[in-house]
Image: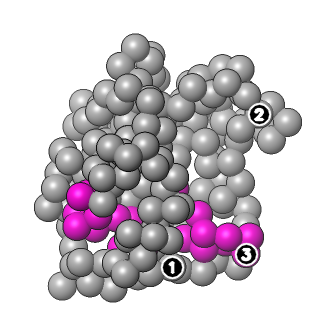
Amino acid sequence: MKPAVNAVILAGGLSRRMGTDKAGMLHPVSGKPLLSHQLAHIADLPLNGVFVSAREEQELPAFSTNIMRINDTGEHGPLGGIAAALHHAPSHHLLVIPVDLPLLTADVLFRMIACIPSLDCGIVAKSPQSLEPLVAIFPPQALPAMATAIQLRNLSVKALIQGPLQAMMESVEFADPTPFRNWNSPADI
């Protein structure tokens, strides 16, 4: 039996190096804001629900009313947004998608969902360079370890996957690194 899966798009970063909010940046090919671009990518995935994690004061491009916005303080980085989304639907697995991976494809995400090994395990993408901790599917059982890491201010998602969550996370290898290239600065575009 495959678990029910929700998705969260992490859009709450401060974008200091980019100099502008990434969620509203226009994708050079689709012409849509990056948030809208990512939402379009996941429209056909077998998901129960979709969340967008953003800072409370952050203005976002418009999105469907059936997508839930989760306000995040931003002080706990991506881990805070992931934990908040898992907290909102604690009986579902959670697919994590960063807003600043505009070359991520639906095919990559379909494959990840198909590779979930069991109800109590998750998946993390592995590119030729390394683990991609922000392209992952976390099981609900990961939430207590996330809460502890946040409390201890150990905010590295990669360290969490390689440490306390190691027994419940399996990796899926991808030969092409392109989908995992993020846009952190104008030079990355």
Placement of the C terminus among the 4 image quadrants: top right
Percent x, y for residue 116?
35, 79
Q: Is 69 a magenta residue?
A: no
Type of amino acid at the residue the image marks with label 2: Ser
35 lies left or right of 15: left
Which residue shows up at 80% across the image and 31% down it? 186
Type of amino acid at the residue the image marks with label 1: Ser
Q: Are marks 2 and 1 in contact (CB under 8 Å)?
A: no
Percent x, y for residue 51?
31, 42
Label annotation for residue 34: none
Under tag 3, what secondary structure?
Answer: loop
Type of amino acid at the residue the image marks with label 3: Pro
Which residue shows up at 77% across the image and 33% down it? 185
Residue holding disc 3: 128
Q: Earlier in the sequence, mark 3 or mark 2?
A: 3
Q: Please, is residue 126 above or below residue 49 in the view?
A: below
Residue holding disc 2: 185
Q: How is the image coloured?
A: one colour
Which residue shows up at 62% across the image and 48% down it? 101
Placement of the N terminus among the 4 image quadrants: bottom left
Residue extending furthest toward the front: 152
Label 1 neighbourhood size at 10 Å, few (<14), some (14-19), many (20+)?
A: some
Under tag 2, what secondary structure?
Answer: loop
Is 1 or 139 nearer to us in this picture? Answer: 139
Under tag 1, what secondary structure?
Answer: strand
Label annotation for residue 171: 1
Q: Quadrant for residue 14, please give it.
A: top right
Q: Are marks 3 and 2 in contact (CB under 8 Å)?
A: no
165 lies left or right of 3: right
Residue extent of the magenta highlight: 122-144
Q: Earlier in the sequence, mark 2 or mark 1?
A: 1
